[in-house]
Image (cartoon, grey):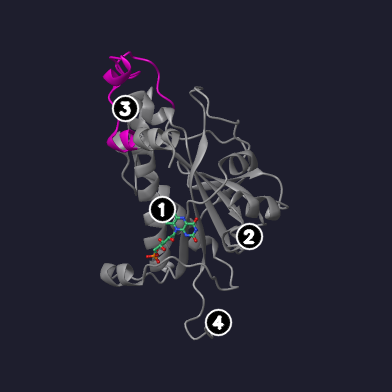
Amino acid sequence: MNDKTRYQIMKNRQFLMGYNLSDVGAEQTDQEQNLSPLPPVKKKQGWGTIVLPADFESLNLMTDIRAVFAQRESCRKYSPEPVSLLELSFLLWSAQGIRRTAGRASNPVTFRNVPSAGSRHPLETYLFLNNVEGLDRGIYHYLPEKHQLEVWENRSDYGEELTEALCGQSFAASAPVVFVLSALPYRTEWRYGLKSSKYILLDAGHACENLYLAGTAAGCGCCAVGAYDQDRIDELLGFMPGPSAEKTYECTVYIAAVGKLPQKNSKPD
Ligand SMILES: Cc1cc2nc3c(=O)[nH]c(=O)nc-3n(C[C@H](O)[C@H](O)[C@H](O)COP(=O)(O)O)c2cc1C
């Protein structure tokens, strides 16, 4: 390891510990300076409206949490059967669904099925849908306030680009559903300043774990994907190249592949 790498590793370890604003000579967060926060959700800006079903009681969910833990594992092979719209809806609701909104109109706070530092909820959810019952292959964006989807990019020819963006992991790029969690860091930075990057990644971990657990309970397999090409996935989703200091800057922070679990009696390789 050369000195430059060693120095960067030390800086990254400092990131793991969180920074204080005083480390860089700053005294106040943007919240303390009464600057405006970002809204907790992105406004609808794609095409169409897909209302997601929410009759989750009709899913045959596992209810024994010990059994869910025992069966949770990273799944990289999926059944050819499509994921149903209700299953997809349940996964979205589990990972980012909003249970209630509180606070002032100038600073609404959402409370969701996952925890988030200060309930700032910096994450947005995008989907590459390859095999979901009743929905065309394409790139979608989740609107958690209304529990709806919108078409984010009007194209379905992303296969090769997505595989490259996932560092050649074709099992993930061709999974029935590819979840991409992005972050708008300023949602969190407004309150937590330099500690935010750490909190944002912790938040993403909670969302992905809910995908694993909700998926297991609903008969779907999930695999977290941290090996991806930042520039390529961000470009596929139309994010401005970064990093930038813009308050609206957005970037991918985590990815997960999901599909129906293969039949238990299918032959091993
Ligand atoms: C942060 C993170 C990144 C990961 N990235 C990938 C990945 O890019 N590709 C992959 O196949 N698995 C990935 N995984 C899954 C791990 O390989 C898996 O969790 C590990 O082997 C343990 O297996 P288990 O999840 O079945 O317990 C990732 C897991 C985590 C938590």
Residue type at numbered disc 1: Cys
Asked if residue 167 is positioned above or below residue 266 in the image, the reply reads: above
Ligand 1's quadrant is: bottom left
Q: Which label is found at residue 208?
A: 1
Query: Quick one: label 3 or label 1, which is nearer the N terminus?
Result: 3
Between residue 241 and residue 11, name the one nearer to us: 11
Please give left or right for residue 201 compared with residue 256 in the image: left
Residue type at numbered disc 3: Tyr
The residues bearing labels 3 and 2 have C-alpha atoms spaced at a distance of 37 Å
Q: Which label is found at residue 130?
A: 2
Query: Quick one: label 3 or label 2, which is nearer the N terminus?
Result: 2
Between residue 115 and residue 159, name the one nearer to us: 159
Secondary structure under the numbered disc 2 in the rendered image: loop
Q: Which residue, given by chain and number where applicable, does mark 4 sit on? A: 269
Please give left or right for residue 241 compared with residue 98 in the image: right
Q: Which label is found at residue 192?
A: 3
Residue 27 lies in the magenta stretch = yes
